[in-house]
Image (cartoon, rainbow, N blue to C red):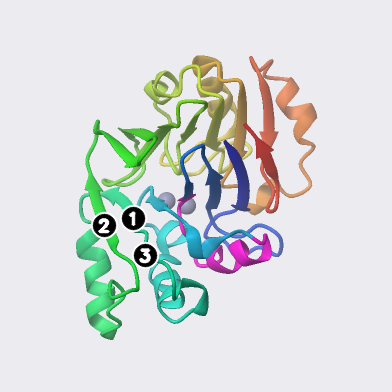
Amino acid sequence: MHLTVLGSGTSHPHPTRSSTSFWLETAAGSVLLDCSAAAIHRMAQERLPWAELDAIWISHFHLDHIGGLAPFLFGMKHAAETEERRKPLTICGHLGLKALFDAVDTAGNYRLLEQNFPVDIVEVSEGDAFTLIDGVAARVYKTPHKPESLAIRLDDGENVLVFTSDTGFDPKIGEFAADSDLFVIESSFVANKVVDTHLELSEAMELTSIARPKRALLNHLYPEWDDVKFEDLARGFSPPCEVLLAFDGMTIEI
Ligand SMILES: [Zn+2]
Ligand SMILES: [Zn+2]
């Protein structure tokens, strides 16, 4: 697997951290993990083959995670790059994704599913195990953030990546991520978090200690992370593995 960080930030406008999105290249195809409004241009900036994307995972319906989905399909519909495309695009998320998508599509009469290729919207629920694309097995786990929020565990037969997306603290998320090669975990706040539905560094580190992944990647970083000396802070928690702080444009060979 190979991961490109498109957006390491949150909904908060920030000069260098755009909202959540990751491009994951697996042994079997490419997956976009969340699709913020910035993601569609960030893919182009990183010279990624967006017209060939195989699947989009939507972790929950907050706009910093789904705001680019309709615009991306609108862009694909009118782009020369997708004229010859015939392979399907899978869009996967919690039950309710189709209704939300249809509401946007109908409101503007965009007909976003009428493309040169099939677009399959697949809805899943807490605890489901399924095939995201041929060759990539997925499992999801309910996270304490929004009613539809899910963490996802992806296995392409060579590597395992777990993506929490936005979440409050639940030690079982650490168990869900056990022995992963890369644990992509939110750490919205440095300390003294103001809401229960996100994590601060000490909690992200605790989940990392439970999961014992090969590496962990902290993301969904609010501006309070600016100017923090991360390496010094992280060392204080004696993590069981290397822990990286995401930045837009970062690439990781998994
Ligand atoms: Zn968010
Ligand atoms: Zn959220």
Q: Is residue 123 magenta?
A: no
User: How far apart in space, not on screen, are marks 3 and 1 (Cα)?
Assistant: 16 Å
Residue labelled with disc 1: 91
Mark nearer the N terminus (3 vs 1): 3
Q: Which mark is residue 86?
A: 3
Residue 34 lies, with reference to residue 166, above or below; the image says below
Residue 39 is a magenta residue = yes
Question: Would you say the beta carbon of the disc 1 residue lies within 8 angstroms of ligand 2?
Answer: no
Amino acid bearing label 2 = Ile
Residue 118: horizontal and vertical position, in percent? 29, 64
Three-letter residue code for mark 3: Arg
Residue 205 sits in quarter: top right
* Horizontal relation, residue 235 to residue 63: left or right: right
Q: CA distance from mark 3 to mark 2?
A: 16 Å
Q: Under tag 1, what secondary structure?
A: strand
Q: Quadrant of the C terminus?
A: top right
What is the number of callouts on the image?
3
Query: Which range of residues does the magenta coloring cover?
Result: 32-47
Asked if the residue under mark 2 is in contact with the one under mark 3, i.e. CB atoms within 8 Å, the reply is no
- The answer to whether the residue labelled 2 contacts the one labelled 1, judged by CB atoms less than 8 Å apart, is yes
Question: Would residue 240 be found to the left or right of residue 69 on screen?
Answer: right
Who is closer to the viewer here, 20 or 87?
87
Taking the spot 38% from the left edge, 47% from the top edge, the residue there is 59
Q: Is mark 2 within 8 Å of ligand 2?
A: no
State which mark lies toward you, 3 or 1: 3
| Spot occupied by residue 192 in the image (x, y as percentages of width and height) | 57, 37
Q: Residue at x 51, y 23 (%)?
A: 180
Question: From where the camera sits, is residue 7 visible?
Answer: no
Helix, strand or loop under label 2 = strand
Give the residue number, with chain letter if any, for mark 2.
121
- Quadrant assignment for the N terminus: top right
Number of residues whose C-alpha sits closer than 10 Å to that of mark 2, classed few (under 14), some (14–19) or many (20 or more)? some
